[in-house]
Image: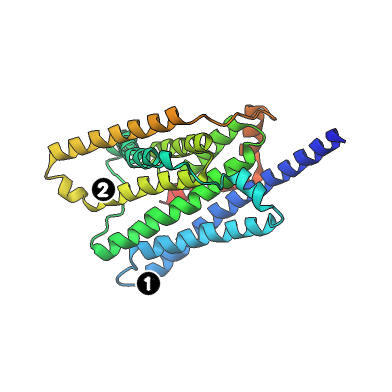
Amino acid sequence: METEANRQSYREGKQRLRSVRWMLFWIAAVQTAVAMVVAVVASFFSVPPPFWVQMLLVELFAYLLPLSFYARENRLLSAKTARERFGLKRCRNDLWIYVILGGIGCQFVMLVLNLPINLLLSQGESVVPRNLTELLAALVVVAVIPAVFEEFLFRGIVYGVMKEFNTRAAMIFTTLLFALMHGSITGFLGYLFLGWAAVEILRRTGSMYACMGFHLANNVTAVLLSRYSGELLYYPMGTLWLFLGGILAAVLGFLGIRNMTTPAPKTNLMRCSDLLGQSFSSLPVLLCILCLAGVWILG
């Protein structure tokens, strides 16, 4: 009886894996299609719509629709099971200061990691809010919405399903797909670090809300640095101290989380190489990567 129950659980898990892989493809496909439609429509205006309007449309369609379909497909999931699988539980109050410090500092680490390829390509990627309205819009569209949607997708659903088979493979797969989904060559290394750090926070705190807070602090820091980057050019020493303070915040945040938590035990129901091989060679993931490659080439 127990063996049959285990087999049934394994079959259900494999079905969830297939569902997650197809969801990733649809997100990449919708993201590509909406971005192209928005770009075509914007070309008909003498003054293109504000950047935050275009980004909002892409984010809402690319994430909200596929996530809604996934939620509908898994509607029989109990609230207790969802909390356990997706990490939907509160973060300890004494950890929040380290989560926020780590999120702020993470942005400075990302900038350092991205610096070599930015110098090589002689370019960087940023959206610069020009006034208070655009700054507030950017904080919502660039900081808040991605922190919620992306964490729920990658650390909640994708990692939550894959970790049942192999924790290491789940970490590698979600981190790589998270970086690829951003479609940024110059920011790829930074997004890899952000994705890895978020997974580690989830493993240690058990709370996806901690991941969202970490991601939000990182994004808010990025928006503020972008907004005031012009002024920073006039204060080189102040900028240097700001970056040193950011790196220190990252170190203090990560060390605090590491010293005050214990990582969840790893699972090894499947070999890491087998699960990664099956995941990256599956049709929906290959199609997903093809869509993302097209965005990279066209962008």
Give the x, y percent position of residue 228. Answer: 21, 51
7 lies left or right of 245: right
179 lies left or right of 87: left
- Circle 2 Cα neighbour tier, 10 Å, few/some/many (<14 / 14–19 / ≥20): some
> Compared with residue 186, is residue 167 higher up or lower down, i.e. above or below?
above
Identify the residue shown where x is 38% and y is 65%. 53
Along the line of sight, the residue nearer the viewer: 67 or 58? 67
Q: Residue furthest bottom?
A: 45
Identify the residue shown where x is 52% and y is 43%. 207
- Circle 1 Cα neighbour tier, 10 Å, few/some/many (<14 / 14–19 / ≥20): few
Amino acid type at circle 2 is: Leu
Amino acid type at circle 1 is: Phe
* Marks 2 and 1 close (CB-CB < 8 Å): no
Instruction: Tell me the residue that label 1 is attached to.
Output: 44
Identify the residue shown where x is 54% and y is 49%. 153
Q: Label 1: state its secondary structure.
A: loop
Give the x, y percent position of residue 23. Answer: 61, 51
The nearer-to-camera label among 2 and 1 is: 2
Give the x, y percent position of residue 173. Answer: 56, 37
Q: Quadrant of residue 273?
A: top right
> Compared with residue 47, is residue 116 higher up or lower down, i.e. above or below?
above
Q: Quadrant of residue 54?
A: bottom left
Q: Label 2: state its secondary structure.
A: helix
CA gap between label 2 and label 1 equals 32 Å
Q: Which mark is residue 225?
A: 2
- Label 2 vs 1, first from the N-terminus: 1
Is residue 291 visible to the viewer in this orientation of the structure?
no
Identify the residue shown where x is 56% and y is 48%. 88
Q: Which mark is residue 154?
A: none
Along the line of sight, the residue nearer the viewer: 199 or 48? 199
Give the x, y percent position of residue 253. Answer: 36, 34
Q: Residue furthest right?
A: 1
